[in-house]
Amino acid sequence: MNKDIEIKAVIFDAYGTLFDVYSVGALAEELFPGHGKALANIWRDRQIDYTRIRTLCDQYIDFWEITKDALRFACASLKLDLTDDKFDKLMQQYAHLAAFPENLGVLDQLRAKGLALGILSNGTREMIDSAVGSAQMDGYFDHILTVEAIRKFKTVPEAYQLGPDSFNLNTNEILFVSSNCWDACGATWFGYQTLWVNRADMPIEELHVTPSVIGTTLNDVFQLIKD
């Protein structure tokens, strides 16, 4: 962490960081008793796997379509009967994920400090707009950046480059916040100051890179923000 460089903007990952991707587990449990947690976990893992495979093979489809494919795989792997009705309900739940409880308070404090705020996500603009609206976060963000512009998913450098290009700042003047360690590591390699929000008490990825700060909630952004 470079305390001599003043952070002028904070960019958040969306899924898992601002919005709880595992909150779909409650509905999944209701639809598939005894399988909700497993379904949510497999769905998320396969979703991320598909972004990587498609980026490596230059076979882009948008994140909404990937999320559909990952849900179908998750149900097939658990041998669950995914009817059209259950599919639609789960996808609509994903479009309106629960936000983490500290989010609005942190965003308010960052705004009060005069920092520019943004989101940088693999999701589509429509997905992010829906999630932001559901979480009552409208008006907080100066830029909502999605990889639709480059047709590749994080952690490619082109995805992270959207931040400095949009905010017109040097990369090290931006704090990138993610609850996904692989994402925080990719952003650190790229040159951002970074916070990994380790909500699930997971071990750090064995990638020979360490985020600037490791925390447990969004409140830990203030470890990197000067008073």
Image: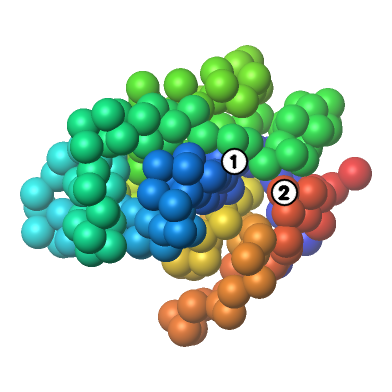
The residue lying toward the viewer, choosing from 217 and 190, is: 217
The location of residue 216, given as percent across then percent down, is: 73, 61
Q: Quadrant of residue 3?
A: bottom right
Q: Residue at x 27, y 29 (%)?
A: 85
Q: Residue furthest front?
A: 33
Seen in the image, is 44 located left or right of residue 136? left
- Res. 211 in view: yes
Tag 2 residue: 218
Seen in the image, is 178 located left or right of residue 136? left
The location of residue 213, given as percent across then percent down, is: 70, 65
SS at mark 1 in the image: loop
In the picture, the quarter occupied by the C terminus is top right
Category of crowding for the residue at label 2, using alpha-carbon neighbours closer than 10 angstroms: few (below 14), some (14–19), many (at least 20): many
The vertical placement of 218 against 8, above or below, is below
The residue lying toward the viewer, choosing from 114 and 15, is: 15
Q: Residue furthest top?
A: 139
Q: Are marks 1 and 2 in contact (CB under 8 Å)?
A: yes
Name the image colouring. Answer: rainbow
